Amino acid sequence: MSRLVKKSPSLCTDLPLDNTDICDKLNLLRTLLSSCFGPTGRLKQVHNNIGGRVVTTSTSSVLLPAISSSQPFVNLIKASIVNHVSRFSDCGLFAAVLCSGLIEQAKRSGLAGNVAVRLNKHLLALCVGYLQREDCGCKVKLDFCSSHNLLTLARSSISSKPACVLTEQETLHVSKLAVQAFLMTVPCDKPGTVTLGRTVTVSVEGHSVLNSAVFPGLLVEITDVFCLNKAENLSSNPLCTVLFSASLAGDLSELGDGIIEVHPSVDMDSQILDQLLELGKQVVKDEVKLFVCQKVIHPVLQQYLRSQGIIVIERLGITLMEPLIQLTGAQPVATLHTTIPAKAYGKVRDLTIRQFGSKTMLHLHPPGESAICTMVLCHRNETMLSELKVVCQKTEHVLRLTLREPSALLGGGCTETHLAAYVRHKSMNEVTETASVLGCSQTEYLRGVEGFCRSLESVATALEHSGGNSLIDLVHAHHWTLPADAMTGCVEDSLGFCGCGLVESSPSKKWTYLNTKYTEFSPASPFRDPTEQPCVLDSFTAKLNALQVAVETANLALDVRYIIQDVN
């Protein structure tokens, strides 16, 4: 078919960072995301103008996919952050705020794009090298002999999401559950290759958060009164279990592709039903007590199995298949046309009934030590519950990252300010030689360093949303917040502790406001007394990758010369 409308030429934008419309949209994105940052971040409600559900959140993994832009340059940055969050689950807003800050500072500095890119790469390498050092002043080693730091890490992640609307008591309760669930999924004393287990999350709306709990094994929602009656009469001996991934509804579509030739006198429904009943007779003979199907089971087969005292669960869904396989050791049967091999059967130790609000759950207990557990999350309404579920799943991933690298970084903006002070001090002592190696003047080098450090500090200042001021102390280079209503001249009385809670204010300390010039210094490590522990921690692995993603994405944006957009 020929075109009815003549094809329009592609739209070409030269030097996108000099384009007012693009810069305005970048600033809007930065304002939007930075206002969500931290435990006092402002919530965002996103609603598509053609309909759909309203999303209320401050979490980057929910917010970024929910917003859209017609500007490819903005989508490039957004896609990079979304990719980071999909892999590491945390520090998405950190990466977004830092990336946009680097772009803005590069524009303000007047540096050529290629010079700014080279400087950013050098300063990123400086940061990464420092963070990976054993004597890094903003890194905390995690001790798995104690759950204290794990609990702090989980609590920091959960409390930074205000859309969950949790009290202090509820935050602590959910944090303990998250750590408990994480530890349950780590196998103990397993020889050979270790495979981590799974946490299955069940949501219950309309109940207090304090009713949330973690259970070893798997909880499956059921509605069948027959299932309940039979489950209550089962003994606690290991129960033989069979698991089907194929539909047992008797549909011809389950027989596969191709042509099916049927004799006119043959009743296909009767033939398939006979096959299903033969299957039922086999599992009865093999003393199966729990019969589970991912899809639908024919009502006649269900009735037959239940008459033989077998618990029947249908429509399990693909999400619960893998956890159930790990729990029972069963191998899913993919067809009803062959005899079930003995090795396909699994076991559960016991079945019990648990009631959570309107939901009735069948609790499948593992036959031995198992790395499968179920977290039941309760909250007062759907919006809060949805956000809490996302946050708990992200927190579990953050805790798992500690198995790869058992470290964490100081939270509350202290890592950013400490890192900025370190980069300033290190760079000032190597101006001549480094500028020569990078092929830029000393003035360009110093402007690039200042822009990079201010971008790091802007992440710390983004944590304040109530009109307060951000400060940095001139010893440890930690981040402090001065409330908006604090009296001038009584700074040390108003500050209390730094952002991470590790350093306490004192009359002998000196501070300066962030984003103001101060004499460079080598920040001292605050870790003197081993009994003193920070109150706020960030994931080391996630933040390190977010730092790299932010700088690399900013460099990519600074490198873009043309945007060619097909408008057809």
Image: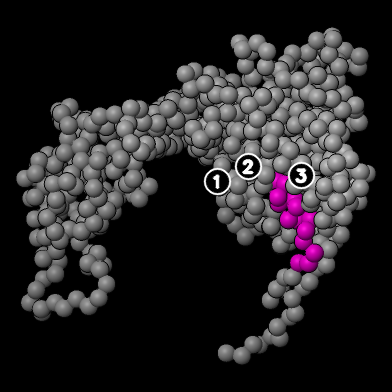
Q: Which residues are magenta?
A: 550-563
Question: How many angstroms separate mark 1 from mark 3 (CA)?
Answer: 25 Å
Badge 2 density bin: few <14, some 14–19, many ≥20, Cα 10 Å = some
Tell me if residue 210 can be seen. yes
Magenta stretch containing residue 284, yes or no?
A: no
Q: Is residue 351 left or right of residue 308?
A: right
Residue at image position (57%, 54%) is 52
Q: Residue 545: which quarter of the image?
A: top right
Mark nearer the N terminus (3 vs 2): 3
Tell me if residue 147 can be seen. no
Q: Position of residue 79 (x, y in %)?
A: 64, 54
Q: Which mark is residue 545?
A: 2
Q: Position of residue 369 (x, y in %)?
A: 29, 29
Q: What's under tag 1, amino acid-wise?
A: Arg
Residue at image position (14%, 69%) is 268
* SS state under label 2: helix
- Nearer to us of marks 1 and 3 is 3
Q: Residue 559: which quarter of the image?
A: bottom right
| Image height of 124 relative to 171, above or below | below
Q: Indicate the quadrant containing the C terminus: top left, top right, bottom left or bottom right.
A: bottom right
* SS state under label 3: helix
Residue on which the image places disc 3? 122
Q: Is residue 24 left or right of residue 183?
A: right
Q: What's under tag 3, amino acid-wise?
A: His
Q: Is residue 258 left or right of residue 545?
A: left
Q: Indicate the quadrant containing the N terminus: top left, top right, bottom left or bottom right.
A: bottom right
